[in-house]
Amino acid sequence: MRLKTSEVKYESMLVLMFFLAWGFLFLDRQALSMLMPLMIEDIAMTNTQIGQVNMWQTIGFAVSAPVFAILSDRLGHKKQIIFWATMVTSVLALITMFAGSYGYLLIVRTLLGASEGVILPIAISMLAAVSRPKKLGRNMGLIYAGSAVIGVAIGPVVVTQLGELFNWRWSFLFVSFPSFVTALLMLKYIKPDVPSTENQPSGRESVSFQQIFSVLKNRNILICVLLSICCMGAMWTFNSFIPLYLTQVSLLSVTKMGLVMGLFGLLTIFWQVFIPFSSDKVGRKPAMIGYAFLAVGTPMMLFLYPESWMSLAVYVMIGGVILALNTIYQSIIPVESVPGSVMATANSLIMGTGELIGALSIGLSGVLADAYGLTAVMVVIAVCFLTASIVSFTLRETLKGKEKPVKHVPMPEAAGSE
């Protein structure tokens, strides 16, 4: 059925809105790691404590995501939930600037992670409700690209430059403001009642617990949970320690580190768009296997040749796969594996479990960094992505036209038939 022009415009508006929300959310989260080389000059912290702060921020994210996704699937009120989550994220990012101790930082960033975890699963389910079927993958890719454009390409350059020119505390003020504006835009432009499409029933329809628990029986969802544990843990470990790695091991200045990460972000935009697009061509399963294996290359090069320009080139050119890979196992495969009515639940289960258990790799990496040096962190990341590539072989293909054909055994003819 052909959608009205107003419905298409609303679909595009939601894509833009959630592109901004996820991009600034990612910047909020990344700012801590990007500014850490400057922060440790004022707040004495070991690598273990740095890992703990990032780990508990991730745990907060992991716990809140499924709780609020299930509530939104059951009760609706998605607009109100996502608005307040974005507003609270802005406030907590702001008060990070007043941090004076490890304990303060631990509490504020854990709460910030909890507010951030609410946003993406609900945004994905709201977008699925209004997206045209042939545009759903593209729309999701564009939302995830927000993290590359805002959080990885633009953010590192601006945040580190502000930190050097003024003070790291003022950088958090800068980071908090866009999320505040995005929350106000959500309040003004998002419709209270999500219109119904063939992808998902109306937000007013109550979803039963039986439907929600059925998600746990889906093979692809369970495999995607395992992939999330490997990939999310590796991704956030990478994001948490790469600024310190580039400044302390690769011996870059803070501003040069910001510029290198900015270049990395520009190429990540390409990967955020190309990975979902290529999975439309080759299939979800082959794409997941291949890109997870490709993600091993960046941490291994940084481990083997930490001061080489070739390692930095590999980081800039293909490191974006580490951030862009989650579009497949977090959103595209779940969307094609479960009914739209429980998509927020499925998405949050994959994201939340992956973040919760994967967060342990952040804490473990901090301990290993204190014991064996920051290079040990890269080994943990490489092992996680290699494991993900192997696990991906057990996925069932979900792309129409790429599924493995089912062999039908002919029924024996009845005796006496002609």
Image (cartoon, rainbow, N blue to C red):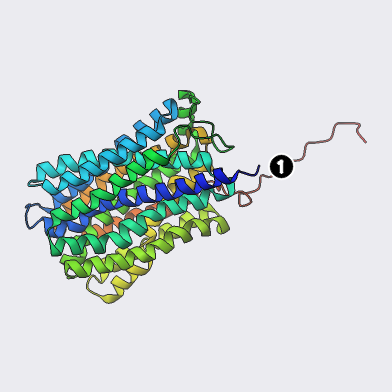
Element at label 1: loop
Q: Amino acid at mark 1?
A: His
Q: Residue 380, image x and y in percent?
A: 27, 55
Q: Residue 257, image x and y in percent?
A: 22, 67
* Picture residue at 11% right of the left edge, 42% below the top: 104
Instruction: Answer with left or right where residue 93 lies relative to residue 349.
Output: left
* Picture residue at 33% right of the left edge, 53% below the top: 384
* Picture residue at 21% right of the left edge, 70% below the top: 256
Q: Please tell me which residue lies in front, 252 or 77.
A: 77
Q: Quadrant of the N terminus?
A: top right
Instruction: Answer with left or right where residue 73 lies relative to residue 147.
Output: right
| Quarter where residue 295 is shown | bottom left
Q: Residue 238, image x and y in percent?
A: 27, 56
Q: Please tell me which residue lies in front, 318 or 255.
A: 255
Q: Against 352, is 234 above or below? A: below
Q: Determine crowd level at label 1: few under 14, some 14-19, many 20+ residues with C-alpha closer than 10 A.
A: few
